[in-house]
Image (cartoon, helix red, strand yellow):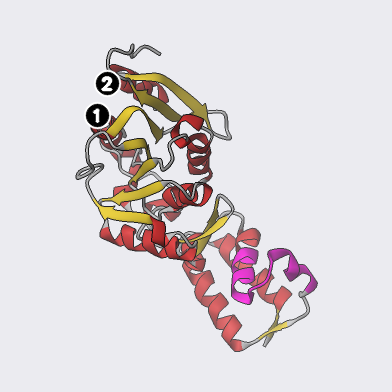
Amino acid sequence: MRRLLEVLQAASDYLAGKGVENPRLVTEQLMSHVLKCPRLQLYVRFESELDEAQLAALRAGVRRLAAREPLQYVVGETDFMGRRFKVDRRALIPRPETEILVETLLQDGSVWTAPAPAVADVGTGSGCVAISLALAHPEARLTGLDASEEALDLARANAELNGVAGRMTFRLADLVAGVEPGILDAVVANLPYIPSADCDGLPPHIRNHEPRTALDGGADGLRVIFRLVGAAWSVLKEGGGLFLETGCDQACAVSDLMTAHGYRGVETRQDLAGRDRIVMGRRAGSGESACR
């Protein structure tokens, strides 16, 4: 057996040598997961000894981190909107920008005035967006759509984990294919938006481990988003909203496209770094102006 502090220091040094960012923090997070204790509690346990099972689990985790696998995949979970979600290679790791997407939709009172608003999360991945909305609005009818059955299996597991599986639907689809026209109060999506040429230059923990299909948005990064802007129009009710996460330099192009398609009230919201990140607009009603 070895002392906790000794193992922590050795693992941190090893990961630093492998080029892992914030090696001490990452090691502490891995160790808190293996030992099933809050990270700060490690500081009062420095002199405690780790048994062989704990050491083996830590060694396995450190090897995966050294191969630049994301910590979230190594521990198998992450936090999103204050809830725990399972994550693995079947879907992207939820990020803070996507929390802003959820918050933007939750703050849009017009979506939630219906007795049972119908909302579709397109490209649902881990299900974090749809599940967070279902938790905030139990009366809503949430559907998660994805082109990957593996991702949908993960989303279903997360719905079970968070206690909302009985009031959600997850379905295999290309964008909104198969959705009845004019029935949705909102469509929300975090779709692939990285230009194809930029994907190979992503950091290795993203490039080598997260699913390429969930990252690659085509030559300009907007191929899938542009398809959804047109497709969402047909499934939204009059006045229904489209809420999109975009790349940090794409909001203007997406706003212009939505306006050209007839969406009204097109607006943007910024991420934590002050960059335009979320674009939203509404399907104009018959005879209604589509101007911003």
Give the residue number, with chain letter if any, for mark 1. 230
Label 1: which secondary element? helix
Image disc number at residue 261: 2
Task: Choose top left, top right, bottom left or bottom right for residue 17.
Answer: bottom right
Residue 160 seen? yes
Disc 1: CA contacts within 10 A as few (<14), some (14-19) or many (>=20): some
Residue that sits furthest to the front in the current view: 115
Residue 226 locus on image (x, y percent): 27, 30
Disc 1 and disc 2 in contact, CB within 8 angstroms: yes
Report the front residue among 206 and 193. 193
Residue 175 locus on image (x, y percent): 25, 42
Q: Which residue is at 57% across, 28% downward?
A: 274
Please state which amino acid type lies under the numbered disc 2: His
> Dividing the image into 4 quarters, which one contains the C terminus?
top left
Disc 2: CA contacts within 10 A as few (<14), some (14-19) or many (>=20): some
Q: First in sequence: mark 1 or mark 2?
A: 1
Report the front residue among 236 and 65. 236
Residue 66 seen? no
Say above or below: 192 vs 94.
above
Residue 131 locus on image (x, y percent): 45, 53
Q: Which residue is at 57% across, 76% downward?
A: 58
> Dividing the image into 4 quarters, which one contains the N terminus?
bottom right
Report if residue 144 lies within the magenta region.
no
Q: Image check: 81 left or right of 205?
A: right
Please state which amino acid type lies under the numbered disc 1: Gly
Say above or below: 6 vs 263.
below
Q: Which residues are magenta?
A: 27-44
